[in-house]
Amino acid sequence: MPPQAMVGSPPRFDKGEAMTADMNTIPPELAARAEQGDSDAQITLGRHFDAAGQVALARGWFARAAKAGRRDGLRELATSLLIRTPIVERDGLGMMQAAARDGDALAAYYWGLLTAEAQFEERWQVGIACLGDAAGRGLAVAREELELLAPNGAAEFTAEAFASRLPLEFICREPRIAIIRNCLRPDLCDWLIRHNRDRSTRAPVHDPASGNHRIEYARSNSHVVCDLPNTSMVLTLLRARILASISPAAQPEVTTLLHYRPGEEFMPHYDFFDLSNPGSAREVAQKGQRSVTCLVYLNDDYQGGETEFLRVGIQHRGRKGDALVFWNLLADRRPDPLTYHAGRPTTVGEKWVVSQWLR
């Protein structure tokens, strides 16, 4: 494992809206067992509270399990510190590294992902080594990714094959729209679909007044929020390639996978935030404006499903593995009204894309 000094400052994973859970479903005996020191019950109870958005209670139970020597309790606590508000990044990183060193396979996997996001020369080699460590401890997802990324062993891995800069092919100048050819290998596209097929939930929209998220008719597709528990080394490498190809200094949002079943769509909208709305203004003040949108097409065996730019008459259906890039802001950083676009419904087949916003 890399020393703490090499960690740097990986981007913070933000879970977004907490999932809801009916706290009445917690069996009374579970709480009693947890209070009596049953570490299995403590972790289960912590997960209940985490699902209900009660972060402090969840962390308390994870901490008790960790204190009792449970590596998975320490990993759960570290994950909470890294993705839940309030973020306590330094403690979360230290705990994740400790759980990995102590033999927790999933912690080793997460530590590899976090390390690969850091900024030091050997980050990819260390990240892949952690992947190998997790695979050796029996973690199936790590073994699958290692076979895809380094079929001849970790020593043969080169990040340049997956994360190097690719040229932009402009198809429109006003607004600025470009294509990145062969952004992701077809077999990696297939793996991302298989790996995430059962993880998707209904995708929300941004509420410009409150700054929160809400479900509404304008968007009927589903998505997977690829925060730390849902991300992968494949996505980490893809995100690095997107940044290298578009804007290395940009700050990426949490990557999402978008899934459109036949008839599902995202009606016309902008990706930038309208500063005249209080919730959007707070969002920009805290995290910056959305400057670029990148969509990586994971499949192309469907009909319909175009990304349509209504004000310039462009309808685009991406080829599997290619990326569509468009700039939401003008050169002077004002929002570009020509980026008004929609995700049209597929008529036959399902559509999968990786969505990456840059700030």
Image (spheres, rainbow, N blue to C red):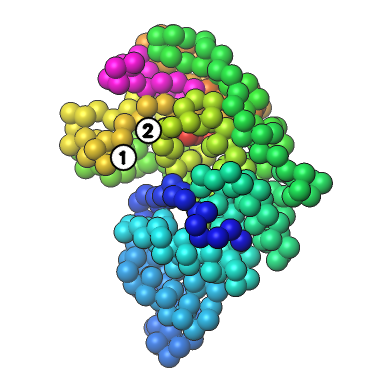
Residue count near mark 2 (Cα–Cα under 10 Å), binned few <14, some 14–19, many ≥20: some
Report the residue that reaches farthest toward the bottom.
Answer: 36
Check disc 2 and give the amino acid type: Arg
Identify the image quadrant of residue 162.
top right
Three-letter residue code for mark 1: Lys
Q: Is residue 185 left or right of residue 238?
A: right
Residue situated in front as seen by the camera: 6 or 264: 6
Contact flag, marks 2 and 1 (Cβ < 8 Å): yes
Q: Which image quarter is the C terminus in?
A: top left
Which element is circle 2 on?
loop
Q: Is residue 340 visible?
A: no
Of pointers 2 and 1, the one earlier in the residue sequence: 1
Q: Which mark is residue 262?
A: none
Q: What residue is drawn where x is 53% and y is 81%?
A: 69
Read off the residue under disc 2: 359
Judge left or right: residue 121 versus residue 250. right
Residue stretch rendered in magenta on the structure: 325-347
Q: Quadrant of residue 30?
A: bottom left
Name of the residue lying farthest toward the right: 152
Where is residue 195 drawn, in percent x and y?
A: 63, 48
**In the shown orientation, is residue 84 left or right of residue 226?**
left
Q: Residue 32 appears at what percent x and percent y?
A: 40, 87
Q: Position of residue 122 (x, y in %)?
A: 61, 46
For mark 1, give the secondary structure.
helix
Q: Which residue is mark 1?
A: 287
User: At 44% across and 74% down in the image, what residue appears?
Assistant: 62
Residue positioned 21% across, 35% down in the render: 281
83 w.r.t. 350: above or below: below
Rendered residue at 50%/73% (across/down):
73
Q: Is residue 283 magenta?
A: no
